[in-house]
């Protein structure tokens, strides 16, 4: 019985390792002189742009005007990425009185801000079994 359980565990682990992918973010438009950090969040559709509901979040120190960030072990699914340059390092996107971003911001698929944030559909991309996805994001 123990051997069957161990075999099942190995098969599940082996299968999950190959059901993950990698995302490479190529972020440009970074205001190097202003410094700060890049705040990066990956969302699924049901939680898109909901603070504290991202699937994965990280902050990376700004070191150049163009940066490449690799995100590994991303489970298969459909996602969107939001990035902003947290110049004042307060861990929040600074906005004006009507909610327009005052710090550089960008989204996967280079989805644009018009009269509000882009829709999930405009920013979405898919990770399939073993995929390595490259996303170019321009901060504006």
Image: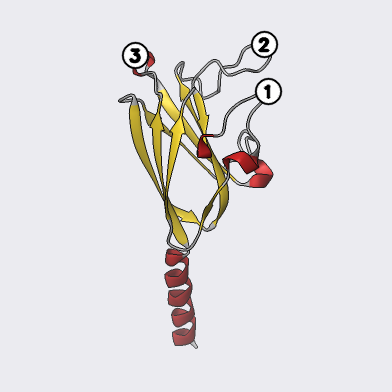
What is the crowding at mark 3: few (fewer than 14 residues within 10 Å), some, or many (at least 20)? few
Label 2: which residue? 97
Q: How far apart are marks 1 and 2 (CA)?
A: 14 Å
**Quarter of the rendering containing residue 35:** top left
* Residue at 41% in and 24% down: 29
**Quarter of the rendering containing residue 43:** top right
Rendered position, 87 above or below 47? above
Label 3: which residue? 33
N-term-proximal mark, 3 vs 1: 3
Rendered position, 108 above or below 19? above
What is the crowding at mark 2: few (fewer than 14 residues within 10 Å), some, or many (at least 20)? few
**Dot 3: element:** helix
* Residue at 34% in and 32% down: 67
* Residue at 58% in and 45% down: 124
Query: Could you tell me residue 31's position as x and y percent?
Result: 39, 18
* Residue at 68% in and 45% down: 46
Q: How is the image coloured?
A: secondary structure
What is the crowding at mark 1: few (fewer than 14 residues within 10 Å), some, or many (at least 20)? few
N-term-proximal mark, 3 vs 2: 3
Query: Could you tell me residue 93's position as x and y percent?
Result: 55, 22
Label 1: which residue? 115
Rendered position, 10 above or below 98? below
**Dot 1: element:** loop
Q: Distance between the residues labelled 3 and 1?
A: 28 Å
């Amino acid at each position: 019985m123990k051997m069957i359980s161990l075999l099942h565990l190995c098969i599940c682990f082996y299968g999950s390792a190959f059901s993950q992918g990698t995302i490479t973010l190529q972020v440009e438009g970074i205001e190097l002189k202003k410094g700060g950090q890049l705040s990066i969040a990956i969302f699924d559709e049901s939680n898109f742009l909901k603070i504290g509901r991202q699937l994965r979040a990280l902050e990376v120190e700004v070191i150049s005007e163009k940066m490449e960030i690799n995100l590994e072990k991303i489970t298969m699914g459909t996602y969107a990425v939001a990035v902003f340059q947290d110049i004042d390092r307060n861990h929040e996107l600074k906005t004006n009185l009507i909610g327009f971003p005052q710090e550089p911001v960008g989204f996967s698929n280079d989805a644009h801000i018009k009269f509000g944030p882009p829709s999930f559909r405009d920013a979405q991309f898919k990770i399939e079994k073993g995929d390595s996805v490259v996303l170019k994001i321009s901060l504006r």
